[in-house]
């Protein structure tokens, strides 16, 4: 394996792909010993200096506290307490600006030192190894120790193992690969023995097979000091070549063991625990000396400070005071970075405090860290891919992130990006790649959260739906039993058994589909959507079968209907379907009004039901058209048809009302149902009346002339002519392009807006902090605002254009489109049914004709579907 | 106090697209010098003229597309395209030939595809092939070089202005000559043009000069070694095998390496990042295939040189190569490869 290098004879070091060698800038700060930090006039202690839940304050404003005293206790499983860095008075508990990328304020304790620096109780341990691991862990947690190298994860949590976890390698990170930072370097040089003691505690807790301490070869003094201190201890000090980001947890594991942590996994899953040298030092102080974590070493460097170096600062020291202490030159200070130059954050407000994770403060002029240069086109040079330690393709990720193609970005493992910035560092076109990735990752997280929410809502909805159905079915069964007891078997009885069987089968299939979908969900199947669609389909089928059973059951003998039974069934189905649609619509509306979470689901359900109703209606119309008895002319006049339907509907309604009244008088127990039935019939009649009115209005002045062509009457097809396929695809392409542009613009706008917001809040904070020279900031805010506005305008314009073109393209609005699509689908289905029916009987010509008709209909349906889809996408856009 | 608010990383590497392009241009200078020395100042005139045309076209297109003209002109990519195309043209090329090629390269092959970074094909080579197909005679008319004398300055200027070919000075390139007489031992022996130190007379120096420039680019890390090395190997290995089999019919590998546009192609043209494959493995495949194609076309095809066609063909295949050479991401079992994902 090429990646295997051998250093110092027997010590094996692996390599990781990519990496960069930026100028180190270490010598500015690593030549002087660690100096004490300032004693500030106020210490600001955020309750959340770590990853996890914020600590809970134990003191009140006005309390006098001693150095090392508990000020706030850890809160929950992953949390860490806060201690007083020196003695003094708690003067405030409340929100203060802290270091956070979003520039938010967060709850803090404010401590005014009394200058005496008086310790409270300390409980040093002579021999920590006499305690049980559990007791030690408790002490570590109480000392507020968190990972000092990176994110600040509570150490006590990180080193408590699960039952089946075994540690093969304990890795101590002394790499410090970011340029400028030398805090660990000085610490290792000056306090190596303490670090070794801390490591021994970790060994006691974790019982690893071996302990490896990684250190970059640009710190020979530190390595020598550690080697000397580690004599007799079971610690293997390994020097790794200087390369950024070898100090990244995953990269260091790879360097020292050759193992990779699985995507989304934790080091312990490959038998590794990583700790920083600073953390080991803090452990030593906490256990052997009884001092909780109240200070840390922070590098102050950059060309805007006169005395760069490493300072042992009290936690909560405001950045401004430390800068002052190091001799800051305000006129040169143009960029203030907390953390390293590769992964740190710029600060706008020097009032924020330094916390447990603050390892470096860079006060730089633009000579040292120049203003970002304008972003140029990506030339696909691949330098970024060569630099990426995670073997990603940054240029592709950038492309996807820029076009808001989050799905593709995820597919290309965006989430495995460690945001090390190596790619952006090498990019010759100055593309702020990491900024794009952060943005895209944020969007992905938001989407995932939303999806989870929607899933929960859907589950709730389905559960309720199932309950309601069950209740209805039970009621129905009771009613039927009663009916059967009262009456002779219904004439439709023979049919009923078959229907019942169908219904049973259908619901069985439905349940199986539900189960399959659930399984798919739990195993994260990418085809989940397909399973869900399947469930929907089965459900509709089952419902329909149930309805059929119901209908068959109550087909009343005194029916005087002249039409054959099939048609009556159909009519009934139509009525049921539209009733179901209406009630679904009502429910959806209510949900919308209450802003319930399941509104969207309900709406889509209503949509499905409507399509179903439409389909059934069309079928009914077809059936009627195909009835020579009821329509002696080849082409029935739709108005006449409708008139008849209206008459039927109203008489049905009247009959229903009468039945209801009777039932009321007899105090029968299905009054409610009958009344609902009557209501439904009335609605149906009303609708038909409305249709009749419409039809009349649409019909030519003299009703007899020019009956509509039979095909149109039987199955309304979309009016769009299926002309010019080439033209179609051309405009398709354009639309795709426009969509792309839209996405890009949207991203641009979101980024611009975010920048503007950040600048704005920075300005606000600066104002509040009484900064004097705001002009430049204001100008920046204005500029960013103008940019955001400009982008917004462009976006709006493009959206309008898209909408206009869509309208021009189809000449229809959304509703018509939906109707068209449903109709086209119906027509298509009918035609294919017809074809199936006639396949064996009809002559060749008819079949040919039917087939070609089917083709046309297919095309129509396709067009309609696509138009609808486009329009829906458009609609989704417009809602934003 | 106005502090810069920026996203990490706060430090930026020294490499800059404009700088990269400038380095490429510097690296062509030895080759340009030798060409001028051997074939007259025609190439030099064409290079200058091509740069002018390219900048004008680029500026006009940027303006038409509503892009910031100054910012994008500064990236220098148009100049590189112009220089490479002009270097590939015969020194006798009249001004209009260069004009058509460069304008087409910049306007159609680059800007109409969306500008720098979006063009699937190497613009210089698109321009070159357009000219080769449209004006085959003008494109194969080389003058000067041994055994002929180098044209005088005035002759070259007249050529550039479009005044006819120079009598007694024009000849075919060694590649052409070899193909014409391949298999005929006597004729091959008589052709002085074929008897340079390692390759065709004169041409070996041109190629050596481009090799020098290429090594400079490698040294400055402007280009990676993958494409040039793979390219040269892809050309030399089949040439070696064939030559071992029948030295009369097939030219020897050195001849291939140091004739025609080999070195210009390997270090300057195939390495154009925009239209090449992006991963290291992909670039090896890309380079090897170009080399092999060049050998095939030179040996069996009907065109004088094959660099342009081979590069364009592989430009076409580059996205495909990229799909199948995606690296395995850290922490993943397998790489996600193939066009689907
Ligand atoms: S380094 Fe920059 S220019 Fe080069 S491929 Fe990556 S993103 Fe594109
Ligand atoms: S920031 Fe992400 S994509 Fe860029 S080099 Fe680091 S890991 Fe790779």
Image (cartoon, rainbow, N blue to C red):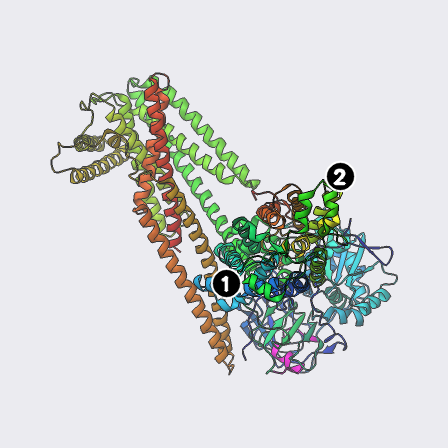
Residue A132 visible, this orientation:
no
Residue A731 visible, this orientation:
yes
Q: What is the chain identity of the residue bearing mark 1? A: B
Q: Is residue A27 left or right of residue B54?
A: right
Q: State if disc 1 and disc 2 touch (CB < 8 Å).
A: no
Above/below status of A245 relative to A477? below
The single residue placed furthest to the left in the displayed view is: A702
Percent across and percent down for residue A690 are 20, 40
Above/below status of B292 relative to A208? above
Q: Earlier in the sequence, mark 2 or mark 1?
A: 1
Q: Secondary structure at mark 2?
A: loop
Q: Residues within 10 Å of mark 2 (few under 14, many from 20)?
A: few
Q: In the rendered image, which quarter contains the C terminus of chain A?
A: bottom left
Ligand 1, by image quadrant, is bottom right
Identify which residue is drawn at 33% across, 25% down.
A850
For the residues carrying marks 2 and 1, which lies nearer the camera in this image? 2
Kindly identify which residue carries mark 1. B58
Count up the numbered dots.
2
Q: What is the chain identity of the residue bearing mark 2? A: B
Kindly identify which residue carries mark 2. B246
Q: Which residues are magenta?
A: A312-329
Q: Is residue A65 left or right of residue A224?
A: left
């Amino acid at each position: 394996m090429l990646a295997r290098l051998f250093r110092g004879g027997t010590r094996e070091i692996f390599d990781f792909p990519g990496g960069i060698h930026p100028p180190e800038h270490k010598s500015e700060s690593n030549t002087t010993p660690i100096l004490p930090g300032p004693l500030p006039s106020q210490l600001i202690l955020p309750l959340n200096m770590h990853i996890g839940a914020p600590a809970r304050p134990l003191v009140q404003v006005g309390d006098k506290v001693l150095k090392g005293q508990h000020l706030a206790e850890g809160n929950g499983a992953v949390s860490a307490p806060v201690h007083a860095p020196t003695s003094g008075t708690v003067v405030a508990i409340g929100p203060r600006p802290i270091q956070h990328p979003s520039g938010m304020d967060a709850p803090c304790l404010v401590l005014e030192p009394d200058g005496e620096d008086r310790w409270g109780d300390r409980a040093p341990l002579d021999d920590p190894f006499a305690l049980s691991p559990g007791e030690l862990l408790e002490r570590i947690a109480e000392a507020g120790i968190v990972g000092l190298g990176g994110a600040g994860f509570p150490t006590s949590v990180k080193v408590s193992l699960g039952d089946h976890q075994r540690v093969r390698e304990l890795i101590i990170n002394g790499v410090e690969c970011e340029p400028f930072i030398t805090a660990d370097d000085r610490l290792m040089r000056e306090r190596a023995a303490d670090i070794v003691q801390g490591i021994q505690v970790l060994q006691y807790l974790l019982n690893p097979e071996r302990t490896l301490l990684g250190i970059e070869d640009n710190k020979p003094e530190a390595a020598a000091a550690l080697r000397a201190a580690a004599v007799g201890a079971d610690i293997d000090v390994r020097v790794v070549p200087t390369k950024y980001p070898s100090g990244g947890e995953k990269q260091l594991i790879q360097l020292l063991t050759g193992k990779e942590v699985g995507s989304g996994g934790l080091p312990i899953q490959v038998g590794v625990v990583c700790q920083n040298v600073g953390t080991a030092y803090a452990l030593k102080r906490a256990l052997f000396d009884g001092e909780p974590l109240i200070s840390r070493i922070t590098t102050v460097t950059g060309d805007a400070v006169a005395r760069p170096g490493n300072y042992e600062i009290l936690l909560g020291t405001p950045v401004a005071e430390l800068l002052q202490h190091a001799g800051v030159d305000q006129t040169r200070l143009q960029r203030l970075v907390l953390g390293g130059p590769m992964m740190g954050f710029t600060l706008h407000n020097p009032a924020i405090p330094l916390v447990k994770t603050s390892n470096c403060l860079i006060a730089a002029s633009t000579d040292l860290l120049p203003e970002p240069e304008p972003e140029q086109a990506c030339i696909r040079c691949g330098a970024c891919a060569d630099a990426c330690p995670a073997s990603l393709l940054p240029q592709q990720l950038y492309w996807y992130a820029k076009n808001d193609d989050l799905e593709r970005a995820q597919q290309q493992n965006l989430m495995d990006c460690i945001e090390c910035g190596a790619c952006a560092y090498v990019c010759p076109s100055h593309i702020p790649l990491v900024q794009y990735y952060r943005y895209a990752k944020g969007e992905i997280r938001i989407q995932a959260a939303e999806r989870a929410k929607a899933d929960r809502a859907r589950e709730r909805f389905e559960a309720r739906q199932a309950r309601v159905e069950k209740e209805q079915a039970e009621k129905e069964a009771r009613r039927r039993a009663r009916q059967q007891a009262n009456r002779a078997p219904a004439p439709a009885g023979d049919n009923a058994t078959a229907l019942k069987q169908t219904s049973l089968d259908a619901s069985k299939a439905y349940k199986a589909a539900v189960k399959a979908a659930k399984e798919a969900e739990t195993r994260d199947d990418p085809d989940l959507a397909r399973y869900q669609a399947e469930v929907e389909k089965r459900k509709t089928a089952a419902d329909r079968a149930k309805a059929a059973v119901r209908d068959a059951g109550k087909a009343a003998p005194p029916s005087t209907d002249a039409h054959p039974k099939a048609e009556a069934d159909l009519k009934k189905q139509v009525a049921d379907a539209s009733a179901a649609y209406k009630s679904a619509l009502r429910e959806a509306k209510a949900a919308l009004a209450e802003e319930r979470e399941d509104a969207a689901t309900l709406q889509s359900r209503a949509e499905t039901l409507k399509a179903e109703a439409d389909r059934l209606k069309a079928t009914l119309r077809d059936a009627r058209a195909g009835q020579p008895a009821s329509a002696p002319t080849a082409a029935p006049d739709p108005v006449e048809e409708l008139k008849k339907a209206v008459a039927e509907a109203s008489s049905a309604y009247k009959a229903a009302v009468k039945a209801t009244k009777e039932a009321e008088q007899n105090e029968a127990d299905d009054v409610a149902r009958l009344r609902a039935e009557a209501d439904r019939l009335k609605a149906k009649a009303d609708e038909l009346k409305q249709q009749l009115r419409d039809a009349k209005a649409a019909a030519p002045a003299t009703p007899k002339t020019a009956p509509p062509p039979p095909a149109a009457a039987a199955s309304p097809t979309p009016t769009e002519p299926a002309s010019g396929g080439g033209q179609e695809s051309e405009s398709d392409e354009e639309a795709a392009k426009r969509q792309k542009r839209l996405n890009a613009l949207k991203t641009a706008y979101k980024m611009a807006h975010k920048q503007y917001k950040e600048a704005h809040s920075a300005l606000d904070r600066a104002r509040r902090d009484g900064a004097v020279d705001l002009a430049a900031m204001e100008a920046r805010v204005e500029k960013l605002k103008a940019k955001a506005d400009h982008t917004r305008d462009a976006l709006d314009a493009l959206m309008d254009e898209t909408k206009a073109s869509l309208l021009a393209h189809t000449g229809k609005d959304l509703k018509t489109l939906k109707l068209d699509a449903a109709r086209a689908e119906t027509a298509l289905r009918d035609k294919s049914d017809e074809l199936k029916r006639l396949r064996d009987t009809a002559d060749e010509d008819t079949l040919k004709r039917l087939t070609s008709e089917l083709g046309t209909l297919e095309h129509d349906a396709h067009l309609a579907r696509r138009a609808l889809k486009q329009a829906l996408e458009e609609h989704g856009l417009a809602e934003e | 106090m106005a502090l810069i608010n920026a996203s990490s990383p706060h430090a930026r590497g020294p490499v800059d697209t404009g700088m990269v392009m400038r380095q490429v241009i510097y690296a062509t200078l030895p080759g340009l010098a030798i060409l001028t020395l051997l074939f007259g100042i025609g190439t030099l005139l064409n290079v200058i003229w091509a740069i002018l045309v390219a900048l004008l076209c680029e500026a006009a297109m940027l303006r038409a597309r509503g892009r910031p003209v100054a910012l994008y002109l500064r990236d220098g990519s148009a100049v590189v395209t112009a220089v490479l195309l002009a270097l590939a043209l015969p020194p006798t090329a009249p001004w209009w030939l260069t004009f058509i090629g460069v304008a087409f390269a910049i306007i159609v092959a680059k800007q109409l595809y969306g500008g720098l970074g979006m063009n699937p094909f190497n613009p210089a080579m698109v321009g070159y092939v357009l000219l080769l197909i449209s004006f085959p005679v003008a494109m194969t008319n080389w003058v000067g070089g041994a055994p002929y004398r180098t044209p005088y300055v005035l002759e070259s200027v007249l050529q550039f202005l479009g005044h006819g070919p120079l009598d007694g000075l024009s000849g075919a390139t060694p590649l052409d000559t070899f193909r014409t007489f391949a298999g005929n031992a006597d004729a091959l022996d008589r052709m002085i043009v074929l008897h340079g130190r390692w390759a065709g007379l004169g041409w070996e120096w041109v190629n050596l000069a481009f090799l020098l420039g290429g090594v400079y680019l490698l040294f400055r890390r402007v280009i990676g070694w993958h494409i040039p090395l793979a390219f040269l190997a892809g050309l030399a290995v089949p040439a070696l095998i064939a030559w071992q089999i029948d030295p009369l019919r097939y030219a020897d590998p050195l001849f291939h390496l140091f004739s025609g546009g080999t070195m210009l192609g390997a270090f300057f043209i195939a390495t154009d990042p925009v239209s090449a494959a992006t991963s290291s493995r992909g670039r090896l495949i890309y380079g090897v295939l170009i080399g092999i194609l060049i050998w095939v076309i030179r040996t069996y095809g009907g065109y004088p040189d094959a660099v342009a066609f081979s590069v364009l063909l592989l430009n076409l295949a580059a996205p495909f190569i990229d799909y199948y050479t995606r690296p395995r991401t850290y922490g993943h079992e397998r790489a996600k490869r193939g066009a689907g994902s």
